[in-house]
Amino acid sequence: MDDSAKKVWPRALTVSRAERLLRVDFDDSASFELPAEYLRTQSPSAEVQGHSEAQRQTVGGKRLVAITGAEPVGNYAVRLLFDDGHSTGIFTWAYLHELGREREKRWRDYLQELSAKGLRRDP
């Protein structure tokens, strides 16, 4: 993570259930629209990330997942609630900024992992 991401602060955070998106505007003028499926599959939770790289899970079947809520965690993060019951990922502002900046590469890598493991995006 670069130094600029450590210092970002959100100016606005909006959940669009209809569009299945989280919109985040940061104080460094960056603005991202992050799909619920992307956020769910990149969740920082132990369920997805494990406790080491070797334990990281590739989560399939989340094409239709939606964000049902967002709860502040202190002044440094947000807990996203998904309609599949997942609610343990705490997304720091820096991690959301990183997900926005790296979206194309991360999504491409995710789709390759799905394919390699015989998983699908559809439930």
Image (cartoon, rainbow, N blue to C red):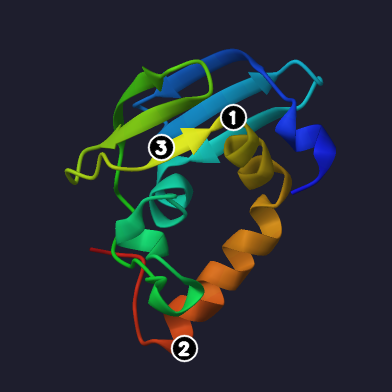
Structural distance between the alpha carbons of marks 3 and 1: 10 Å
Instruction: Reply above or below: 6 against 73.
Output: below
Residue 97 sits in quarter: top right
Residue indicated by mark 2: 116
Tell me the element at label 1: helix
Mark 2, secondary structure of its residue: helix
**Left or right relative to 65: residue 43:** right
Contact, CB < 8 Å: mark 3 with mark 1? no
Is 121 rendered above or below residue 73? below
Q: Position of residue 100 (x, y in %)?
A: 66, 41
Q: How many marks?
A: 3
Q: Residue at x 69, y 62 (%)?
A: 105
**Front residue of this view, candidates 57 and 16:** 57
Between label 1 and label 2, give the one nearer the viewer. 1
Kind of residue sitting beneath label 2: Ala
Q: Quadrant of residue 69?
A: top left
Identify residue type, mark 1.
Trp
- Residue 119 in the image: state x and y as whole percent: 34, 79
Say if mark 3 contacts mark 2, CB within 8 Å: no
Closest to the camera, between mark 3 and mark 2, is 3
Furthest residue in direction top, as rendered: 11
Residue beneath disc 3: 90
Residue 43 to residue 118: above or below? above
Q: CA distance from mark 3 to mark 2?
A: 28 Å
Q: Amino acid at mark 3?
A: Ile
Is residue 82 shown left or right of residue 16?
left
Q: Residue at x 81, y 45 (%)?
A: 2
Which residue corresponds to mark 1?
93
